[in-house]
Image: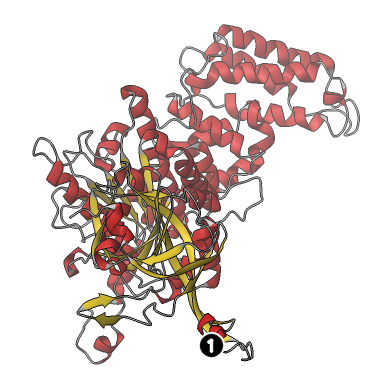
């Protein structure tokens, strides 16, 4: 049954408006207003409760306010007593009052006030002092709750303050403009995230047009391994694990997909001396060049050394005085090591003539402080290099070399390629620093804990990786991908999460470039405070954590344009990046006890709603406050229930059952050590 505006006017009057401000409305209650929940001729009268709703009529419908404060304050002597005896003293008289936060307007679009009411965000018209305040009946409360859920397609729970009315959400609003699920450990936020995914897919499956599976994509980045089994009853769920078991595919984040910034962060490459060498090596490897192949790089080597010696020849002091002449000595030694023992094909005459000049010039043969080299010697080396460069065909241009493009190359070739580049004139000044970076890269690639993840044995193309992780374009391979990061080594976890987020973001960007339309995809980040924390690094060299945070800040700012929705779940909102939180337009707030977390959340919502959040510390499990873009007014929701098998594996540890022997743990520390180090016991 749909209630008309006239029927809403029949609500019980409880008092009059005493003061009005944009943030707060004070109502003075009548003596006849119910003292508490009472029975009157079989009819239940509910006195307004905290977070309950009160109506105030206006010219377009009804202002809906939520109760934020109830109390008794002193008032002037009652009017009845004043009329009885004017000689009485004007003593304080107790008067009940309540305070409301104005949230929305309940209105009827037609002039007759019939049909379904609509709840509009914001206040169209504020009441005047003296307006009557009404307490809605149970039926009216349910209609208000249903109006707040109008347009919703997915049921996520019920409203305890609205007689158990269903709370529905619109996926376009929730996922299209990002969602934050916040709450302390044990408040039920992981079950809420799992339920949102499950209930969204169930609702879509009931309404899909051709009886096929929904064309939906949920990618869950799960650092604790909580979601690995909670979707097992659904078809075609892809679960990627660091240590796969059964039919589960392995989790891979190939190193050839990393950008130069990600390589530099994980290897701590110095910006001025080591990073240019790293970028050049990545650029050449992606272009198909091999710096360890002498015949492939000979023309560029000759051209580079020729330019270097031309600069020597133009500056007499560079080769004749101390200490500048040491650069000439270093260049001669470098050329001797590069060209001296090189095995060439088709270039032997060129290299032999050059080696003869290098050997004859040798080391400085005059005094240490003056006339170390003669001008004719420097010019001879320069001329020999220019002649050799001309015979070798001149420098070749590397085409297609982009150090950040996800083009396949063998990561194991990177250290040797960098070592070869370090001998060239372009990096002669940084050759001493290069060895430390090269050794760090060798150690990273040789780490048994990381080897299968960053250098998988099975060579996988970019298209194959996208198909496995994001899924087929029509989601025929499944709608959910769970990436279990629980056993990922701490050295690489921020890089892995950042790369995964960046690749998904860039993939949907290119889908839009091809199709012209957004490609709806949802990226879920659990324990988000570990990956998108506040920035604390002021150094010029960003860390892996900085790059990971910057990736998700970009997703939060730009993902909506390409169809990429972000769901972040965290128990510490105050530790999250303010950029990411500010871009979340919908919040599901579970119990929050920490005062810093409460203050932060209160600053993210409109002033009129801030008072409602004072209930957060006392919320029981499974209850949350839904507010933001997904609902026109904040709603207390009792989140739907999941069976034990459908819940994420985040239950509290059972100390007592373990202590008394009801629960056992079958393992050995040798098993733990083998799994930990990547070296299983023999």
Q: Tell me the quadrant of the picture where the C terminus can be found.
A: bottom left
Q: Residue at x 35, y 73 (%)?
A: 186
- In the rendered structure, the answer to whether residue 74 lies left or right of residue 488 reads right
Figure disc tally:
1
Q: Is disc 1 surrounded by few (<14), some (14 to 19) or many (20+) residues within 10 Å?
A: few
Residue that mark 1 sits on: 84
Occupied quadrant, residue 409: top left
Residue at the extreme right of the image, as rendered? 370
Residue 477 vertical placement versus 305 (above, below) = below
Q: Position of residue 211 (x, y in %)?
A: 8, 39
Residue 658, by quadrant, is bottom left
Please determine whether, in this image, residue 363 is positioned above or below residue 431. above
Look at the picture and state if 250 lies above or below 591: above
Q: Which element type, helix, strand or loop, lies under badge 1?
A: helix
- Residue 80 seen from this side: yes
> How has the structure been colored for display?
secondary structure
Image location of residue 81, percent across then percent down:
53, 86
221 or 78, which lies in front? 78
Left or right relative to 71: residue 434: right
- Quadrant, the N terminus: bottom left
Side (left or right) of 461 relative to 446: left
Question: Which residue sits furthest left?
Answer: 211
Q: Is 67 in front, or is 356?
A: 67
Residue 360 at what x, y percent from top left? 72, 20
Q: Is residue 104 above or below residue 31?
A: above
Please give the name of the residue rendered at 53% of the width and 54% of the height, measured from the top-left corner: 577
Residue 253 visible in the shown view: no
């Amino acid at each position: 049954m749909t209630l008309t505006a006239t029927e809403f006017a029949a609500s019980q009057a409880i008092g009059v408006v005493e003061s009005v401000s944009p943030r707060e409305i004070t109502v003075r209650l009548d003596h006849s207003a119910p003292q508490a929940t009472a029975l009157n001729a079989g009819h239940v009268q509910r006195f307004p409760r905290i977070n309950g709703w009160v109506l105030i009529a206006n010219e377009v419908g009804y202002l809906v306010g939520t109760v934020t404060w109830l109390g008794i304050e002193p008032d002037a002597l009652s009017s009845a007593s004043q009329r009885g005896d004017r000689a009485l003293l004007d003593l304080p008289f107790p008067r009940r009052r309540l305070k409301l936060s104005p949230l929305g307007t309940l209105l009827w679009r037609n002039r007759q006030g019939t049909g379904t009411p609509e709840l509009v965000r914001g206040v169209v018209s504020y009441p005047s002092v003296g307006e009557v305040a009404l307490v809605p009946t149970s039926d009216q409360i349910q209609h208000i709750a249903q109006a707040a859920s109008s347009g919703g397609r997915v049921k996520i729970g019920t409203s305890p303050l609205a007689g158990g009315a269903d709370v529905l959400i619109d996926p376009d609003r929730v996922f299209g403009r990002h969602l934050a699920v916040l709450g302390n450990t044990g408040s039920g936020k992981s079950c809420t995230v799992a339920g949102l995914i499950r209930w969204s897919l169930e609702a879509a499956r009931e309404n899909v047009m051709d009886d096929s599976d929904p064309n939906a994509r949920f990618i869950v980045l799960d650092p604790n391994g909580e979601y690995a089994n909670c979707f097992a009853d659904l078809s075609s769920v892809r679960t990627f694990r660091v240590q796969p078991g059964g039919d589960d595919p392995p989790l891979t984040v190939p190193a050839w997909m990393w950008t130069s910034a990600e390589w530099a962060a994980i290897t701590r490459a110095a910006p001025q001396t080591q990073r240019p060498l790293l970028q050049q090596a990545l650029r050449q490897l992606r272009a198909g060049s091999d710096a360890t192949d002498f015949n492939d790089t000979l023309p560029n080597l000759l051209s580079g050394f020729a330019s270097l010696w031309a600069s020597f020849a133009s500056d007499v002091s560079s080769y004749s005085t101390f200490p500048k002449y040491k650069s000439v000595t270093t260049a001669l030694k470098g050329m001797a090591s590069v060209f001296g023992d090189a095995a060439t094909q088709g270039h032997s005459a060129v290299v032999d003539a050059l080696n003869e000049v290098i050997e004859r010039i040798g080391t400085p043969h005059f005094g240490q402080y003056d006339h170390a080299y003669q001008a004719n010697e420097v010019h001879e080396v320069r001329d020999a290099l220019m002649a050799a460069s001309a015979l070798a065909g001149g420098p070749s241009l590397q085409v297609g070399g982009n150090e950040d493009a996800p083009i396949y190359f063998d990561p194991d070739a990177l250290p040797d390629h960098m070592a070869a580049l370090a001998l060239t004139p372009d990096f002669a000044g940084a050759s001493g620093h290069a060895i430390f970076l090269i050794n760090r890269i060798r150690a990273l690639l040789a780490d048994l804990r990381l080897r299968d993840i960053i250098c998988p044995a099975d060579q996988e193309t970019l298209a194959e990786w996208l198909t496995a992780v994001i899924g087929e374009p029509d989601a025929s391979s499944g709608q959910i991908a769970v990436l279990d990061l629980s056993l990922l080594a701490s050295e690489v976890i921020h890089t892995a999460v950042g790369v995964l987020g960046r690749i998904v973001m860039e993939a949907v960007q290119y889908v839009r470039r091809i199709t012209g339309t957004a490609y709806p995809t949802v990226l879920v980040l659990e324990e988000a405070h570990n990956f998108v924390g506040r920035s604390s690094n002021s150094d010029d060299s960003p860390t892996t954590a900085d790059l990971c945070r910057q990736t998700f800040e970009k997703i939060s700012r730009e993902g909506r344009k390409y169809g990429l929705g972000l769901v972040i779940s965290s128990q510490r909102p105050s530790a999250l990046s303010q950029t990411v939180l500010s871009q979340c337009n919908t919040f599901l707030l579970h119990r929050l006890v920490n005062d810093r977390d409460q203050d932060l959340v209160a600053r993210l919502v409109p002033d009129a709603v801030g008072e409602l959040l004072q209930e957060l510390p006392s919320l029981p499990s499974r209850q949350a406050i839904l507010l933001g873009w997904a609902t026109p007014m904040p709603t207390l929701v009792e989140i739907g229930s999941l069976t034990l098998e459908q819940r994420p594996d985040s239950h509290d540890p059972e100390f007592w059952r373990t202590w008394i022997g009801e629960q056992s743990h079958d393992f050995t520390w040798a098993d733990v050590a083998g799994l930990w180090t990547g070296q299983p016991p023999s």
